[in-house]
Amino acid sequence: MSAVCLLKNFDGTMPRLEVLPDGGRTRVLLHTRYWDREDRLVSADVEFSDVAAVRFSVNYLGSSAGSELFGLYELAGEEEKLRLLKENFAGRRRDFLLTGYDWQAEDPADLLNCMDPLERFDPADYHLYQQQTEGGVYQILARTWRLKER
């Protein structure tokens, strides 16, 4: 697997992450402050559009979450995109079962057997972005991203 650095946002903070659900138009906003190449403090939002999946891990034991940003990367490889999407579907099933959902594994009409969105997914239409922080790692599967300075 390979990765390309899209944004060097080292020595910053990420005080807030927002997920704005809206079906196929879901957006994710990473609110950040970091130093740019001209030693200027930048307040910005990294906005991801048409988000299909999000995963994050928090480094709770190592340091305060989100205290340092190391870079926004795009990860290459369609396998990783599909893996993340399949993990989300499997997690959804697991979460339903944990709450006592009466799953009918043989019934194609059962909510947890509906794989239509996964079957229609074309990984070539999406990018897998990864924002690294000292406090954890965020992966976002989305069509596009953009930086909006405030």
Image: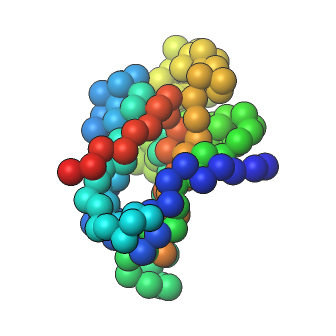
Q: Position of residue 84 (x, y in %)?
A: 61, 42
Q: Nearer the viewer, residue 32 or 87?
A: 32
Answer with the quarter of the image where residue 42 lies: bottom left
Q: Name the residue: 57% across, 29% down.
A: 126
Residue 134 shows in this picture: yes
Q: Name the residue: 38% across, 76% down.
A: 67
**In this view, 2 is above or below 37:** above
**In this view, 131 is above or below 146:** below
**In this view, 9 is above or below 94:** below
Q: Nearer the viewer, residue 43 or 57?
A: 43
Q: Name the residue: 78% across, 49% down.
A: 1
Q: Position of residue 82 (x, y in %)?
A: 67, 35
Residue 137 shows in this picture: no
Here the colouring is rainbow
Q: Nearer the viewer, residue 37 or 145?
A: 37
Q: Position of residue 71 (x, y in %)?
A: 52, 61
Q: Position of residue 137 (x, y in %)?
A: 52, 62
In the shown orientation, is residue 68 left or right of residue 126? left
Q: Name the residue: 60% across, 46% down.
A: 74
Answer with the quarter of the image where residue 36 lies: bottom left
**In this view, 48 is above or below 114:** below
Q: Nearer the viewer, residue 88 or 76?
A: 76
